[in-house]
Amino acid sequence: MLEELRITGLGVIEDTTLPLTGGMNVITGETGAGKTMVVTGLGLLFGGRADAGRVRAEPGRAVVEGRLRLGGRVAETVHARITDAGGEPDEDGCLLLSRTVTVEGRSRAHLGGRGMPVSMLGEVGEQAVAVHGQSDQLRLLRPAEQRAALDRFAGPEHEKLLDATRDAFTRWRRVVDDLADRRRNARERHQETDLLRLGLDEITRVDPQPGEDDELKAEAQRLEHAEGLRTAAQLAHQCVAGGLEATDDTPDASTLLGTARRTLEAQAGTDPALGELAVRLEEAATLVADVSVELSTYLAGLDADPARLQALYERRAALRALTRKYADDVDGVIAWAERARTRLSELDNSDELLDELDREASRLAGEVAELAGRLSVSRQEAAARFAEQVTVELAGLAMPHARIEVAVLPRPAGRAEPTLPVNGVDVGVGPDGGDEVELRLLAHPGAPSLPLQRGASGGELSRVMLAIEVVFAGSGGPPTLVFDEVDAGVGGQAAVEIGRRLARLARSHQVLVVTHLPQVAAFADRHLVVAKDTGGAVTTSGVRVVEDTERARELARMLAGLPDSDLGIAHAEELLAVAARERRS
């Protein structure tokens, strides 16, 4: 749950902290006091779009901070994701979140002690918090949102089937698009194929080897300077081992080292230090002897071969011709050839390949149609359950005669989507199958079954939305639910029933409710009031927890606008007592 929320510099809120609890938290206050800013702050904290126009000019930035404590599988999923991103929870398992927005519109996010992309806050929000306001009610009127709501309700097996349908659809459209492109651009493909084959033929004739250009350059340098290399090697060999053509009596390095070693060994009995030096001279003599052997081998293999040098020149010229056309060096030429071979396979426009792609497209189309059919059956089964459960909830929300229907209809063919036969009917098919889903309301017996956008008033739509959320809560979902004035247009007994349903929802979830109804506020486990201060030069708002007498006065204000009325307070206390009995039952 969200344990604490602090908001600074956002709208009319200068700096305030909301201490939240498990169960039902209610936020009330006069119109314009800043209740909406609380929900706006929650939206920012969990990755919502930043509006620089809501940032207070002083101090020039808005900061929203929160402390989130999660449990179960949600905690495992969120903590693992944050750890992968470089953050970490506190030692007590809490997560600290922060979002900063400046008046210039710049936005920063911190999570688990590390700077993070704002999208990371959104990922956490999807797992931890669901926000429902009047805009969400309007969104629920869209057919795509109604289908998505039914899919969420249907359960994990349905989700797997939906994922399989999306995957098959993506593969099918990829093959279809590839086939269409090959046929549409056949001439350009043939031209590109001819150019690539010419290049590959030229490279294949030369047959360059990895690193060959550097090896040939080194060998050519040795042959070009063979005489100079021979002279240097012979002189070095003569110095270390006398060589084969010594012309004077000057002793070589091996002879001098041997003499020095024997001289020191003769005195080693007198001073052991000379014996140690003699050993090191012996090691030096061994090293010199090895160098002498290697110089002899080098001289034996050094040969000025004009024919070989000419062959090297010709080979290097052939390689340079390739590097001028295809890459900077031989390794690059080889890589170009590999890419060309891959591209040729992609450009293949043979009749055999086109026929193969045709067969693959037909096979995948059949797979998509079969999955879409299974998805439609699954939706119809879920629709019956969903409608029944929402209807039961509506009965408890002072709509005892209302009934919800969920129609799963084949999507008409001939639109932008491709058409496939699904369950014997040609339908338009997309990544989510071939269904359209429509929520319908029968407001009372004998009333026509009408789509929500035509059959529900504002108050009825609020209750339908709440009923749907209660049903969703029973199927899992985020542990924290936020309701922003979803009770608009509702009053009387219906308002009491909404409060009762929210209180029931709060038994398994943390619920935050922004409301103007005292019947709803009376059911809260914690009541927070947003109050406006107009005493200074700038209007500000803050939030405080109200209890006992203060809470009764707030409910009296909400009931009649008279917080000091004895009759209003008595009515508020009666409302609180009724709500307390309901919560205990």
Image (cartoon, helix red, strand yellow):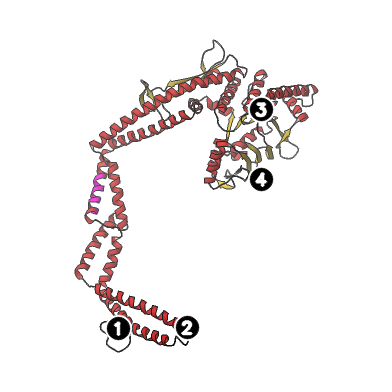
Q: CA distance from mark 1 to mark 2?
A: 30 Å
Mark closest to the chain's N terminus, 3 or 2: 2
Contact between marks 2 and 4 (CB within 8 A): the answer is no
Position of 249 compared to 526: left or right?
left
In the image, what residue occupies the spot 44% across and 85% down? 268
136 over 330 or under it: above or below: above
User: Which label is found at residue 515?
Assistant: 3
Residue that mark 2 sits on: 273
Contact between marks 4 and 1 (CB within 8 A): the answer is no
* Residue 500 image position (x, y, % from top left): 65, 23
* Residue 112 image position (x, y, % from top left): 59, 45
Residue that mark 4 sits on: 59
Q: CA distance from mark 2 to mark 4?
A: 80 Å
What is the secondary structure assignment of the residue under circle 2?
Answer: helix
Magenta-tinted stretch:
193-203
Q: CA distance from mark 3 to mark 4?
A: 30 Å
Discs 4/1, front:
1
Magenta stretch: residue 198 in it?
A: yes
In the image, what residue occupies the spot 58% across and 32% down? 131
In the image, what residue occupies the spot 77% across and 24% down? 569
Contact between marks 3 and 1 (CB within 8 A): the answer is no
Magenta stretch: residue 415 in it?
A: no
Position of 96 compared to 347: left or right?
right
Q: CA distance from mark 3 to mark 2?
A: 97 Å
Discs 2/4, front:
2
* Residue 304 image position (x, y, % from top left): 22, 73
**Viewer-side residue, 204 vs 41:** 204
**Disc 4 residue type?**
Pro
Q: Residue furthest front?
A: 269
Position of 548 compared to 189: left or right?
right
> On the image, which quarter does residue 466 sit in?
top right
Contact between marks 3 and 4 (CB within 8 A): the answer is no
